[in-house]
Image: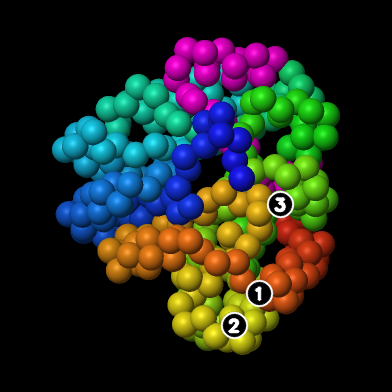
Amino acid sequence: MPDTNSAIKDITKYIYGTTRLGDKNIPYEERINIARAAMNSGVWFHTSRMYGNALEVLGEVFAEEPGKVPKLIIKIEGTNIKEFRASIDENLVPMGLKELQLAQLCLGGGLAEEFANGGDCYKAFRDIKDEGLVKGYVCEVFPWTSTGPLKALREGYTEGIVDAFIFYLNPLQRFASNILWDELVNRKQNIISMRTVAGGPVHSMRDVPGFAWKDYLQKRAVEVAPVFERSGIASWTEFCVRFAHSFPQVIATVGSTGKIKNLDEFLAAKENPEPLPGEIISEITALQQRWSDELDIHAEPWTM
């Protein structure tokens, strides 16, 4: 469970991912409606300037009822602290906000090196907290970036700064390397899982040509679909939410949707999600360990 004194003490088990709010293929009013519905549900939100005009959609909805503005995790980028600070403003201003709950550390270049090696960035992160711009930080992880966070964690640099580690974690993807995953589990670090349903129903990814955005997901769906079927759980959404919360370190899962129906499924699944049976978790965990060694840690950035 999260530290009750930290910035994540009241995090919701499901966090609404806002990726689809910037999808111009979805009518604007529909995007407004789902953002409003998610806000009214009381869950936290996850967003980014990367998501088209999602911030402007959120700004419009937040202005309607300022008292209901959710706590936010926002991707904050930078190769140095100046860029990092500018990214905070770039994200907050369109929403009409002056602070955010959790900054997702999306670090590159020299800033990523400082993070891995205990550099000056840590003082800067503390200063930004002291100024009230952010309440806490979560460390973003991908297979191709796992080495830096692993080093920072092992050396103790993240202690008192990083409230959780955030990465894709669902039945088809575990975007922390095997060695980093083991370290996070052994050290009982808080984890926020992303991409809850891996991009859509497992049977569609397995059977519908082109549904899975990458071939590797289709191949993994072939292996995972029988496990899902044996579980007896009717809903892929429920299965995935329960999968994430089967790991004691997982405090929340971020799932994005542009449809009210899917949002309702997420909201229903988050209510006291029961862990999946141990044999199912063991089977999928073994698959993920194999996938990580075979593909994930060898992948070029942004190819997965």
Residue identifier under label 1: 277
Q: Is 7 rendered above or below residue 250?
A: above
**Is residue 158 shown in magenta?**
no
Tag 2 and tag 1, C-beta contact below 8 Å: yes
Q: Is 7 rendered above or below residue 86?
A: below
Indicate the quadrant containing the N terminus: top left, top right, bottom left or bottom right.
top right
Q: Which mark is drawn over residue 231?
A: 2
The residue positioned 83% from the left and 29% from the top of the image is 155
Indicate the quadrant containing the C terminus: top left, top right, bottom left or bottom right.
bottom right
User: Mark 2 to mark 1: distance in Å?
Assistant: 8 Å
Residue identifier under label 3: 176
User: Which amino acid, mark 2?
Assistant: Ser
State the SS at label 2.
Answer: helix
User: Which amino acid, mark 3?
Assistant: Ala
Find residue 273 and report its horizontal and vertical position in percent. 51, 64
Q: Which residues are magenta?
A: 120-147
The residue positioned 60% from the left and 66% from the top of the image is 275
Q: How many marks?
A: 3
Q: Is residue 37 left or right of residue 52?
A: left
Q: Quadrant of residue 284?
A: bottom right
User: Which amino acid, mark 1?
Assistant: Pro
